[in-house]
Image (cartoon, rainbow, N blue to C red):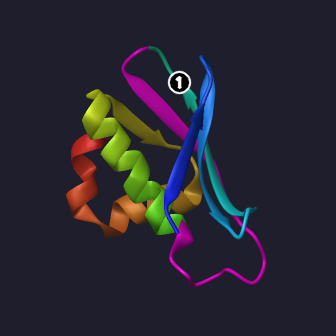
Amino acid sequence: MDVQLHTTEKNGYFYIEVDGVMQAQMTFVFAGPERIIIDHTEVQPGNEGKGYGKKMVSAAVDYAREKHIKIIPLCPFAKSVFDRVPEFRDVL
């Protein structure tokens, strides 16, 4: 179960598929060339507590580090992960 990424010129999303079915998704928009805004995280019913949300935030952090960009976590869930995981804060 890997986190996958889909992007367009304006936005994108990280997602987790299980057996070909999307089970979790975290959306973002590009805010210029140097930032993304995480605006929504959703996990399908029955998948709560499996860590899917945190895995997607972790993938976003890896993406931001790789692209040398910053993240603005407007999504309450994503913000809570950044609040709890100090190692992720370098991309804020």
Disc 1, SS: strand
Q: In this view, does 34 lie to the left or right of 77?
A: left
Give, as a three-letter code, the residue at label 1.
Phe
Residue 92, placed above or below residue 24: above
Q: What's the magenta region?
A: 33-52
Q: Is residue 72 left or right of residue 21?
A: left
Residue 48 drawn in magenta: yes
**Image location of residue 59, percent across then percent down:** 41, 52
Crowd around label 1: few <14 · some 14–19 · many ≥20 (10 Å): some
- State which quadrant residue 70 falls in: top left
- Foreground: 39 or 15? 15
**Image location of residue 82, percent across then percent down:** 37, 58
Q: Name the residue under label 1.
A: 30
**Image location of residue 24, percent across then percent down:** 66, 63
Residue 13 drawn in magenta: no
- State which quadrant residue 27 falls in: top right
Say which quadrant the C terminus sits in.
top left
